[in-house]
Image: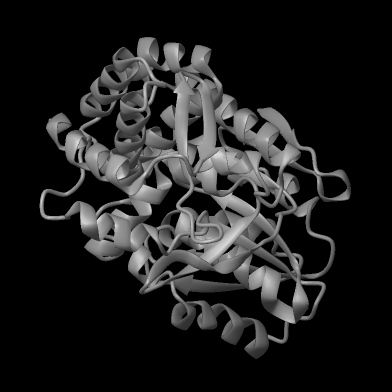
Amino acid sequence: MQQLTVELGERSYPIYIGVGLLSQAQLLTRHVRAGQVLVVSNETIAPLYLEPVLAACAHLQVDSCILPDGEKYKNLEVLNRIFDTLLERRHNRSTTLVALGGGVVGDMTGFAAASYQRGVDFIQLPTTLLAQVDSSVGGKTAVNHPRGKNMIGAFYQPRCVIADIDTLSTLPEREYAAGIAEVIKYGLIADSEFFDWLERHLEALQSRDGEVLATAIARSCDNKARVVSRDEREGGLRAILNLGHTFGHAIETWQGYGDWLHGEAVAAGMVIAAELSRQLGWLDPAVVNRLVEMLQLLALPTAPPPAMSADRFIELMAVDKKVLDGKQRLVLLQALGQACVTDEPTMAQITAAIESSRRYTG
């Protein structure tokens, strides 16, 4: 087992990464501060992994709330099911919510924890690669709105993150590949050596080699933890973690949540961001080609949906959390491993990059 720490003063917490961690009851229960636990999962994950989590908390009042599976259910209506269970089972303000699942379950459970009785403890047990390397770390919680992704939420840190690599063995290939997109992101924004390492080990990572997978998860979490520790609430630096996300969220909103997986939309979004960076003269064209080749090897999208116009991108991107004082801010690359947040590109330049990126269709 590897252990990292997100350094946030009194809100600091550990990230545990290893195999068989869900069966280690004490790892979970040491972070439960009182006698009530609500485990939130979904219809896909619960049959696979709910039982050992409930068994670990058998000496407590432990209840469960099983949500439908899918991004399209990440909304206020479904969120209310968590509150209904908490109230029906009379959970008080010392309860602990446990998120057992991927990014949707983690985001919704975290938001429920931030809101219930003005804030209760929660623990992340991520079961997808994307959640283990990204969404479970950093305290971003939210639900979607038909007009914009993750527009209703809160910054709220978990008590701990327990990433059991064994859970990835049941992850469908498409979801696993989508998670690797977020891993590649860390190399692009802050860790060029990691990007080089990923190129050399991509096939082993794709085949779920245990040692390579553990290294990739730990390196990704370490990169994210260092950024979050310096900028918890995205006042500046933390925004670089959103490389490709402004374009990707526009794709998800346009397509309808769940048509493209989040990591697939981010993959295409990163290509657009890299292409815009190249057109601005910041990024070596070879880096764009390397990124495209890696994503294509994983069968991930490297271009926007053909039917989605640049005008529609611009319209949907205007409803984005990085828009400030009416200006569209984007995360771009000044070099491999060096990201920045900028409002410098004009709408004409953004449009040109969207159209130019279409040529990267695999």
Q: How many marks?
A: 0
Q: Is residue 221 visible?
A: yes
| Relative to 163, 297 lies left or right | left
Q: Which residue is depicted at the point 74% across and 39% down?
A: 229
Q: Is residue 248 above or below residue 288?
A: below
Residue 89 is drawn in which quadrant? Answer: bottom right
Q: Is residue 80 left or right of residue 157?
A: left
**126 lies left or right of 201:** right
Q: Foreground: 194 or 360?
A: 360
The answer to which of 63 and 5 lies nearer the viewer is 5
Q: Which residue is painted at 34% across and 69% down in the image?
A: 72
Residue 94 position in % (x across, y down)? 82, 72
Q: Is residue 172 visible?
A: no
Q: Is residue 302 above or below residue 76?
A: above
Which picture quadrant has residue 304?
top left
Where in the figure is residue 18, as x and y percent of width and height?
59, 31
Question: Measured from the top left, where is residue 54 in percent x and y?
Answer: 61, 62
Choose between 287 and 355: the one closer to the eye: 355
